[in-house]
Image (cartoon, rainbow, N blue to C red):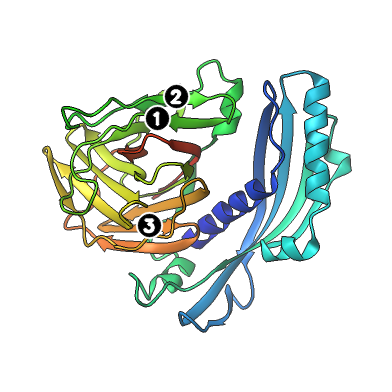
Amino acid sequence: MDVLSQFALSALDNAVNDLLTVAVPNGVNRQLSIIPSQIKPAGLGGYLGAHAEPSGPILARRIIATLDLSVSQGSDSSASTYLNQQLRVLLTQDRGDLQRAGFYKIKLDPERSEALNARFNVDFEYRHLPTDPGGIIETLDLGLDLNATPYKARFVWDVDTASLRSEAEPLREFAIADDPHLSPTSPASNWQFDQANGWIAQSGAARGGSRTLSNARKAGAQLLWRPNANPLRLSRFIASMRFQSDSHDGIGLVFSRKDDNNFSFFLASHRHRYQMFGSKRDGVYDFIGAPAEELEMLPGQPHQLEIICFDKTLIAVLDGRQTLQVEGQDESEPGEIGFLTHVNDQAHFLRARLVDLY
């Protein structure tokens, strides 16, 4: 799977979640699965045309998929009522609104649906627009189309946190690993699974170092991903997360983590309008490349972040738009990956997806 196809899957996931507007009742567990059967270039070999401002090619992927929406637990009555309400919302969407969101078709398949399970046939198009010439990259679009990483891709892990409601230990596949270099007056992290909202919440303003770009020290709260309760050892990957931050402070990902004193990270701060890649080597923090001192990320709104890591290259994509690329001095080392916050006590994580580049 090429990287642009991975972006397309993330965009489809976001678009579907945006349509699921009916609140899930307490005690009811909603499970959502998107099963792609075909991902192919749209237009002429993936090229749709030229974009005027910023100038560059518009690239696209078309996805044919099955959307599986099921409910369980609670009473059959409350689960069925919720599902029927959500079906009405999905099936009465304005056609124009759906097309603007990328959907060419979203149709209920009654032959494969049951009382507490609904299946839809979906036809979705993702359009990848060129980045701002004043930003970071002007050449990545074609690289994405050709998967110039130059590695093959395979899925490793995909967790919709709402599906964890039914788990006896919702955080069984995660491990808390706060940075030991927090400030002496810093509170500890507070990682919890929020049953009502179906997300992983971090409510402790763990902090060490400056909130601004005056230095690279951004010690904070970390929650490592442990698929099947096993530590990761990946050096080339695409790590995706869907999140919502009600705080204006730092949120991102830690990766290439060998231990408390050796890892890399990406952090975005709405309060100070920056995004950066950094590292901690033998306990010493440093920037990786130049930060970007602009950020379009709104508190209280869901966002999608992808971090692409291969060889010496690090790329950040926020809400389907590439926002930062840097080149490190050394190749990325194998290590763990996880959620990261810095001074942020209102961070919510809704999904984690991991692709190995091999």
Other-residue count near label 3 (Cα within 10 Å), few / some / many at <14 / 14–19 / ≥20: many
Above or below, comparing residue 222 to residue 329 in the picture: above
Other-residue count near label 2 (Cα within 10 Å), few / some / many at <14 / 14–19 / ≥20: some
Out of 237 and 214, give the one closest to the viewer: 214
Q: Amino acid at mark 1?
A: Ser
Above or below, comparing residue 39 to residue 351 in the picture: below
Query: Residue tagged by mark 2?
Result: 192
Camera-side mark, 1 or 2: 1
**Whole-percent x and y of residue 199?**
53, 32
Q: Which of the 4 image quarters holds residue 308? A: bottom left
State left or right for residue 230 relative to residue 68.
Answer: left
Q: Secondary structure at mark 3?
A: strand
Q: Secondary structure at mark 2?
A: strand
Marks 1 and 3 sit apart, C-alpha to C-alpha, by 25 Å
Query: Residue tagged by mark 1?
Result: 203
Out of 45 and 80, give the one closest to the viewer: 80
Compare marks 1 and 3 and give the one earlier in the sequence: 1
Camera-side mark, 2 or 3: 2
Marks 2 and 3 sit apart, C-alpha to C-alpha, by 26 Å
Compare marks 1 and 2 and give the one earlier in the sequence: 2
Kindly tell me whether residue 43 is visible in this rendering. yes
State left or right for residue 147 relative to residue 134.
Answer: right
